[in-house]
Amino acid sequence: MMPATSTEQVCDLPQAADFTVSNLAEADGALRDRFSRDGYLLLKRAVSPAQCDALLNDLLGVLSPHIGFDTSTGTPTLAGDPFYETDPIWDEVYPRVQKLESFHRFFHQPNMLEIMRRIAGREPWVYPIKMARIATPRMLGYETPPHQDAYSHHAGPTMAGIWVALHDVDSTMGRVKVLPGSHKGGVRKVFEAQGVGGVQCEIYDHETLWHVSDFEQGDVLIFNSAMVHRAEPNTSDSKVRLSVDTRFCDYGAPVFSTNLEPHHGWRIQGLNWEAIYRDWKSRDGQYYWKTYPNCF
Ligand SMILES: O=C(O)CCC(=O)C(=O)O
């Protein structure tokens, strides 16, 4: 099957079905079988509103005045100019996001670790790199292109992505979507592309059916390291999508060194662990990754 090598070919054939829905009340075996079949799991409302709101409020605190919150819709809103990863406004606010203790601790809470443990069936190790996504409107063409995390994180097969919607996300707000089953063909060639990450992977001609739905607050998307996923453009007038994600693997699996650095620490001066940890209330868990036995 010939790959489609341009963004146009990828975007011209959009077909979508709803995500297959999973939830934490299901048996571990059923969740693992579906994860292995589809390459992803959408766990509905797996994180409590209280946990989501606590982090959302902290994020909104450091994103002010660029992003506010519409209490009537429960949606973050853009207050000024739009921006995307690496723009000057993003570079101004992102170090403040990265310095939030609650942001780094979010995926280490017991219920989050339990979700990862249940899906992997093994003791999980949470990558130090933590990402916050700020998808603003009026940045069409800069959304995350189709990619596989196995490439971007130099990761092996037990690595998975875990992504959490901190508020409801409707179809105008730049939802994340997945190409079910695409993890089965291994790691693909990549091409330069505009948007977060700067590369997109091959999409084959027959791969036209994406899975996507609106997210509710607390929905968790878990994806296999080789599963192709992307973001839709944010076509709303002023709504902003805020979500957080990281990666995890079986404890002891090889982890590439860049995953031990703060997200964008490689290009934003002074964005290092020392600065991130400086004002935390507790030192617990700081530098936890230093004792990981298998980095390369
Ligand atoms: O949330 C997004 O826009 C992108 C998420 C993503 O692609 C990822 O976590 O790898």
Image (cartoon, helix red, strand yellow):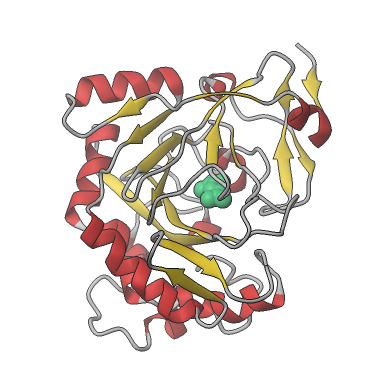
Q: Is residue 139 left or right of residue 269?
A: right
Residue 157 is left or right of residue 151, and the answer is: left
Q: Position of residue 101 (x, y in %)?
A: 33, 75
Give the residue displayed 20% in from the left and 45% down from the top: 114
Can residue 287 be seen?
Answer: no
Q: Is residue 249 above or below residue 132?
A: above
Residue appearing at x 73%, y 52% in the figure: 140
Residue 128 image point, x, y percent = 41, 61
Q: Quadrant of residue 42?
A: top left
Query: Is 258 situated above or below 93?
Result: above
Q: Nearer the viewer, residue 50 or 247?
A: 50
Asked whether 143 or 213 is in front, the reply is 213
Residue 69 rendering spot, x and y as whole percentages: 44, 70
In the shown orientation, is residue 219 left or right of residue 233?
left
Q: Nearer the viewer, residue 83 or 76?
A: 76
Q: Is residue 275 visible?
A: yes
Count all numbered tags in the image, as a single digit: 0
